[in-house]
């Protein structure tokens, strides 16, 4: 039985290799050059390009406008793959939110998820904030208008039946400004939806005694259960000064997506490049350090998996 299975796999691989006999270029959409999305795309391309002699794929990962720009570019056929937040993957596939006018991108396919982007609450140690509920009556930076952190904060407040009026101050500072505000005692806590480790948070905890605040409870459990683009998350203990233990919260995932129009063999080779070199991939950015194969092929994915990815995952016995 094993011999027949091996012959089938070998035959499939030979057919795929024949389909890529000529050099083929693939493009991965990322994000701003200072962000983790850019590192994700560059890291994947680095691993793909290590095997160009075997599979004839050459990969580039230019800086882009981020999640929505990447999804639109894949849909238009201008890019082959891209990084996108799990909530935008959901909305793009279903044609909701910002994708409502253009309709559902039914050919979108998930490949895998990457690092988590936890909903993060950091409070001054002298503010007496140990839980999210303790934020009531405090001065909180909720995020600048149009930002993901503000949008997610509004979702949490709605789930808890709160409003911005429940805070003594709801400031709308940008991420680059909020660390200084915490250190200067202009706010008691700051909110940030971001991958870790993060420079802004590192700056905050290095200028003032601060603690990570867990975001848990029945309302959060319901948000995760009701919305496939949310997932439970944790901020590893010891990553930031003042928080030696893991901090439980929730968040979105950075995910890697493509289209069903992209050849199965191309997606298979990209997935293979990452997971055959998984330890090397995890070393390419601190945010990748705690990734696991099991979580990456399931967490935060709302579009169907691409057939090329499924083929690899089945070969590894993960599906």
Image: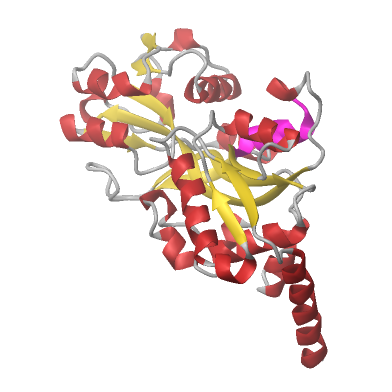
Q: Is residue 150 visible?
A: yes
Residue nearest the observer in this picture, 316 or 123: 316
Q: Could you tell me if residue 249 is visible in this image?
A: no
Please tell me whether the stretch drawn in magenta is mainly helix, strand or loop.
helix
Query: Residue at 73% across / 62% down in the picture?
Result: 265
- x then y, percent, for residue 266: 69, 58
Res. 196 image quadrant: top left
Q: Is residue 262 shown above or below 319?
A: above
Q: Position of residue 69 (x, y in %)?
A: 61, 29
Q: How is the image coloured?
A: secondary structure
Examine the rendered structure and indicate whether residue 256 appears above or below residue 89. Answer: below
Q: Is residue 93 magenta?
A: yes
Residue 210 relative to residue 112: left or right: left
Q: Quadrant of the C terminus?
A: bottom right
Q: Is 225 drawn above or below residue 159 in the view shown?
A: below
- 12 or 299, nearer to the observer: 12
Identify the image quadrant of residue 300.
Answer: top right
> Total marks drawn?
0
Q: Which residues are magenta?
A: 85-96
Name the side, left or right, on which 106 lies relative to 138: right
Position of 232 compared to 78: left or right? left
**Residue at screen point 58% across, 23% down:** 155
The residue under the point 69% across, 21% down is: 98
Name the spot of residue 299 as percent of width and height, x first. Answer: 62, 50
Residue 77, position in %: x, y?
Answer: 73, 38
Q: Inspect the magenta stretch and tell me whether residue 295 lies in it.
A: no
Give the answer, above or below, for where 195 lies relative to 102.
below
Depth check: 138 or 309 in front? Answer: 309
Residue sitting at x 67%, y 33%: 73
Image quadrant in which the N terminus is located:
bottom right
């Amino acid at each position: 039985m094993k011999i027949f299975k091996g012959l089938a796999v070998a035959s499939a691989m030979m057919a795929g290799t024949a389909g890529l006999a000529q050099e083929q270029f693939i493009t991965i959409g990322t994000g701003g050059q200072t962000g983790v999305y850019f590192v994700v795309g560059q890291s994947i391309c680095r691993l793909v390009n290590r095997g160009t002699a075997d599979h004839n794929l050459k990969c580039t990962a230019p800086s882009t406008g981020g999640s929505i720009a990447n999804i639109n570019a894949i849909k238009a056929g201008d890019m082959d793959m891209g990084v996108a937040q799990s909530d935008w993957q959901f909305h793009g596939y279903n044609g909701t939110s910002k994708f409502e006018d253009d309709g559902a991108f039914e050919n979108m396919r998930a490949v895998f998820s990457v690092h988590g982007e936890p909903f993060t609450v950091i409070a001054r140690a002298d503010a007496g904030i140990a839980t999210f509920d303790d934020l009531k009556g405090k001065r909180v930076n909720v995020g600048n208008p149009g930002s993901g952190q503000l949008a997610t904060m509004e979702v949490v407040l709605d789930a808890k039946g709160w409003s911005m009026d429940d805070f003594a101050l709801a400031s709308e500072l940008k991420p680059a400004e909020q660390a200084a505000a915490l250190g200067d005692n202009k706010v008691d806590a700051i909110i940030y939806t971001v991958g870790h480790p993060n420079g802004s948070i590192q700056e905050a905890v290095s200028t003032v005694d601060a603690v990570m605040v867990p975001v848990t409870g029945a309302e959060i459990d319901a948000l995760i259960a009701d919305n496939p683009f949310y997932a439970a998350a944790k901020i590893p203990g010891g990553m930031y000064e003042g928080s030696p233990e893991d901090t439980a919260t929730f968040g979105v995932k950075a995910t890697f997506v493509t289209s069903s129009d992209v050849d199965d063999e191309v997606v298979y080779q990209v997935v293979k490049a990452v997971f055959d070199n998984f330890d090397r991939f995890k070393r390419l950015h601190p945010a990748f350090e705690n990734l696991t194969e099991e979580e990456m092929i399931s967490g935060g994915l709302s579009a169907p998996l691409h057939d090329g990815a499924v083929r690899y995952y089945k070969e590894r016995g993960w599906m």
